[in-house]
Amino acid sequence: MEVLKVNNLFKSFKGLNVIEDLSFSVKENSIFGFIGKNGAGKTTTMKMILGFLEATKGEIYVCGEKVVYGNTSTNKYIGYLPDVPEYYGYMTPKEYLKLCGEVTGMRKKDIKVKSEELLTLVGLEGVNRKISGFSRGMKQRLGIAQALLNEPKLLICDEPTSALDPIGRKEILDILYKVKNKTTIIFSTHILSDVEKICDTVGLLNDGKIVMYGNLQEIKSKFKTDSIVIELQDKDKGLILEEKLKSIKDITEVVVEGKEVKLQVKNMEEVSKDIIKVFAENNISIRKYEILEPSLEKLFLEVVK
């Protein structure tokens, strides 16, 4: 089931197109990485999905229901975490979630149960301090709890890990991955390593257009290069190894740099057996044997240049 479907979306400001013919969909219980440079149009797209901005042209559907600008009925399906969430700083986390639940019409009993569950999920159980004293990471975690309060079908997170330290980023990513079985997530970011850690599918937005879209592993396999990096225990063995490896017909290039040997090969499965055989016959020890996969960062740089 497609929780979100965007069809031929355009958005212009004063005659300047910032979103051009944008189309993508997000399947149920997946994490969609919406990536692009700052200013690529990610936040603009999200605001149109939420009905906060009017599309110049095109259609958006959430859970099969058309999004209409100014009529935010489709937001009953959506939980939203903006890049910089704002709170009433004098409240505690429980007080804030209680207020949010009451505003949306939840029953008091449900608010209490759900608040306790979500505060445990985001690691804020038992925290009774005022929100004004929270770190950026704690505020982001509370924001996720608030966005999940009404059990949304779609959770939209706009740059949730920006400006966080490595520990804070990991905490947010872990939480998002945990709730994948309960909701569908759109995760907007320019931090590509974060996308690789938790996302199933990606859409790369550049100058208002989708330039790469699909299953992350399938995309990587299309761009896969037949490259191997080997790190030796003894750098003096490199030159001996170079000649031996060049004699293998499916190795097209051998580069030795100290303890590191880089290979370009054809027929990866078969040639790997021959490489291991060379090591064994010449009693050469290795520290690392790695078949290289293209990183999302490398693919990003290739398609936007």
Image: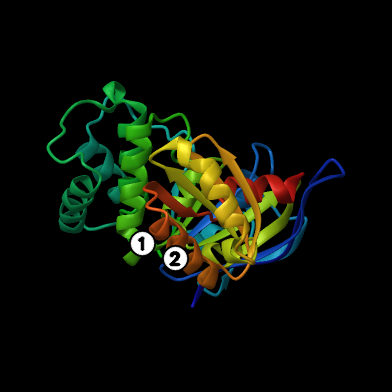
Number of other residues with Cα within 10 Å of mark 2, as a class: few under 14, some 14 to 19, many 20 or more: many
Reading the image, the residue beneath label 2 is 30
Reading the image, the residue beneath label 1 is 180
Residue at the extreme right of the image, as rendered: 15
The reply to whether residue 294 is visible in this rendering is no
Task: Find numbered disc 1 in the image and state the secondary structure of the residue it sits on.
Answer: helix
Evaluate if marks 1 and 2 touch, with contact meaning CB atoms under 8 Å apart: yes
Left or right? Give the position of 46 relative to 111: right
Question: Residue 78 — which label?
Answer: none
Q: Is residue 283 above or below residue 4?
A: above
Where is residue 251 shown, x and y percent of the image?
A: 63, 61
- What's the CA distance linking mark 1 and mark 2? 6 Å
Residue drawn 37% across and 63% down?
A: 183
Where is residue 238 shown, x and y percent of the image?
A: 51, 42
Report the amino acid beneath label 1.
Answer: Lys
Residue drawn 52% across and 46% down?
A: 240
Residue drawn 49% across and 44% down?
A: 193
Residue at the extreme top of the image, as rendered: 133
